[in-house]
Structure formats: C-alpha cells, structure tokens
Image (cartoon, rainbow, N blue to C red):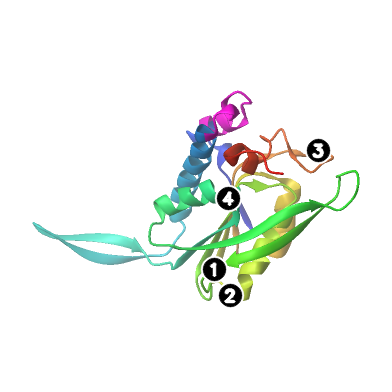
Amino acid sequence: MKVNHLAEQNSIVNQYLAELRDKDYQQNRLLFRNNIRRIGQMMAFELSKTLHYAAHDVETPLGTAHVNLPQDDLVIATVLRAGLPFHQGFLDVFDHAASAFVSAYRMYTNREHTEVGVHTEYMAAPSVEGKTLVIVDPMLATGGSMAAAYEAFLKTGTPKQVHICSVIGTDEGIEVVRQAVPEDATLWCAVIDPGMNDHKYIVPGFGDCGDLCYGEKL
C-alpha cells in the first residue's frame, strides 16, 4: 500500500491543520467543519492526479477544445458522523461521483477504556463492482473503523481501485489498514502523528472529530 503524507510538503493544508489542533479555534464548530472540508478538497485534488484520463473534444462557441478528462467511475464513501464534512470536501471536487455511507463506531471492550472494538450497523451504498472506491474518514487512530468500513462496502462488489483518505492518522492505524486492503491500494493522510494515549485517542491529535464538528454525544 502506497502512503501519501501531505504534511511532509509545505502547503496551505498545514494552516488548516494548525487551526484544527488549536483548542481556542476548536470553540468555533463552523470553522472546524470548514477546515475538515477544505482538507478534503485539497486531498481530492491531489488524488485526482492519479486517476485515468482520456482525450475528449469540447465544442466552444468559437471552435473545438481538446481536453483530457477523468475516466474513473468513483464512489466516495464515508463513515457517519465525523466523516460528513470531509466527505463533502471530496464531493466538492468530484461532483460526478456516487456516494456511500456506513455507520461504524468504536466501543470500549474493557472497564478501563483502554481496549476498543468497532461496531457497524447502517449502510447505504451503490455497487462498487469495478469502480474506484474512495473511503474518507478524518480519524485513523486504531484503524479498526476504516477496516470495518472497507469490509462492509465489499458486500456490494469488488472495486477496481481503493483509496483510503484521512485527515490525521497513526502508524498503528496505517498498519491495520495495510493488512485489510489490497496491496495496490493508496492511503492519503494530511498528517501522521506519533501514536495514541491509553484511551486510543491520537496524540497530539485534535480530539474527537465528531464532537468538535457537531457537539458532544451521550
């Protein structure tokens, strides 16, 4: 699996990441959601460079223009609820793509809240058979939710190509995903942090993405 780490190169993405991490900026949910969305847009643009293109002619009022257009049949999939603004960023760029959704959430499996499992329930997805499947989820901590989401979408078919996209990840989570997806899959992370704390939250990270986007849940 190829790993693309956007923060290794200087770009405006670093400003968005800094604001996402800043505990004062985090008080503004609209700004937080917008930065998640904008990173999705930037990442989608980078991903678009890897797609397959073919020559087409476009008739303008004054003549014929020759352009290369993407040929991939895309399905942009996300994990509810934290993935929604990230997903929208990708749809802003890939406006002809289909969408897929799955609910996957972590559950602590011991009293100390140091071990987690992942539970999936609702799924709404088109067939991914022979298509380019792009799974977007802002947090790649343990990797369990992403691996479970990929397994769920496989119930609708076998994709031609797989892209895994996250705002922030860890080496441990990346390794879990590496074991779950095909060898020729590509992973995109805006930034990769050193690891997690005892409760499986990314450190330094930026906290719970879903809560910061939409408010705390019960």
Other residues around mark 3 within 10 Å, as few (<14) / some (14–19) / many (≥20): few
Using residue 25 as the reference point, say whether residue 88 is left or right of it: left
Query: How far apart in space, not on screen, are marks 1 and 3 (Cα)?
Result: 34 Å
Query: How far apart in space, not on screen, are marks 1 and 2 (Cα)?
Result: 7 Å
Q: Earlier in the sequence, mark 1 or mark 2?
A: 1
Using residue 177 as the reference point, say whether residue 93 is left or right of it: left
Amino acid type indicated by mark 2: Thr
Query: How far apart in space, not on screen, are marks 3 and 4 (Cα)?
Result: 22 Å
Amino acid type indicated by mark 1: Ala
Whether 18 is among the magenta residues is: yes
Q: Nearer the viewer, residue 215 or 206?
A: 215
Numbered mark located on residue 161 in the image? none
- Residue identifier under label 1: 125
- Residue identifier under label 2: 156
Q: Earlier in the sequence, mark 2 or mark 4?
A: 4
Amino acid type indicated by mark 3: Asn
Q: Earlier in the sequence, mark 3 or mark 2?
A: 2
Numbered mark located on residue 197 in the image? 3
**Percent x, y for residue 55?**
29, 66
Amino acid type indicated by mark 4: Gly
In the image, residue 83 sits, relative to residue 12, either above or below, namely: below
Other residues around mark 1 within 10 Å, as few (<14) / some (14–19) / many (≥20): some
Of circles 1 and 2, the one toward us is 1
Q: Earlier in the sequence, mark 3 or mark 4?
A: 4
Other residues around mark 4 within 10 Å, as few (<14) / some (14–19) / many (≥20): many
The magenta region covers 15-29
- Residue identifier under label 4: 83
In the image, residue 182 sits, relative to residue 145, either above or below, namely: below
**Percent x, y for residue 85?**
52, 46
Q: Are marks 1 and 2 in contact (CB under 8 Å)?
A: yes
Query: How far apart in space, not on screen, are marks 3 and 2 (Cα)?
Result: 35 Å
